[in-house]
Image (spheres, grey):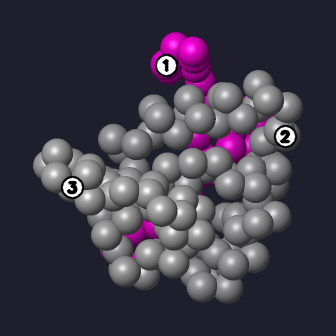
Amino acid sequence: MSAEFRDIFFLPNKERLEHMAFRATKKGLARNEFIMVAIDVDDPSWSEVVESLMPGQDWQAIRDRGEKPVARGTVLADNIVEFLCEVCPDIASALKSELPQGVVRAVVMADGGASVYHIEPFPHFKDN
């Protein structure tokens, strides 16, 4: 399990996660009610989670374009935190600790493990 790999995986997804977090807060969700996720779709450790969160998604079409498929989204904390604490106990304290002012949690699931990051909700992209 490589935290360094997850750091590298996180960086190109950070802006999109920040934007999705911004949209979640604008819809009225409190920062501690949800977490952002970025999951390596091709990591067999997380395939069931990906299928549960995004059933029937055509990941092959993304691969066919030469891109790496990443499942990104907003997940209610009540629906995933306990599961993550059970399968990755090393991140439990990061998932359950008090959030610093102005940030939300983002969890990257890749390379057989998970890492928690704090991100600031931000409107990087134009909403339609």
Reading the image, the residue beneath label 1 is 125
Residue 24: x and y, percent?
Answer: 72, 35
The residue positioned 26% from the left and 50% from the top of the image is 62
Mark 2 lies on residue: 30
Residue 81 occupies which quadrant of the picture?
bottom right
Is residue 124 shown left or right of residue 92? left
Relative to 84, say whether 54 is above or below: above
Q: Looking at the image, can residue 84 be seen?
A: yes
- In this view, the residue in front, 107 or 45, is 45
Q: Nearer the viewer, residue 118 or 52?
A: 52
Q: Secondary structure at mark 2?
A: loop
Q: SS at mark 3? A: helix
Q: Is residue 116 magenta?
A: yes
> Quadrant location of residue 93?
bottom right
From the viewer's side, name the closer residue of 87 and 58.
Answer: 58
The residue labelled by disc 3 is: 63
Residue 104 is a magenta residue: yes
- Residue 98 is left or right of residue 3, and the answer is right
Q: Marks 3 and 2, Cα distance to the nearest angstrom? A: 35 Å
Residue 39 percent across, percent down from the top left? 45, 61
Q: Amino acid at mark 2?
A: Ala
Task: Please report the bounds of the magenta region as a residue range.
Answer: 100-128
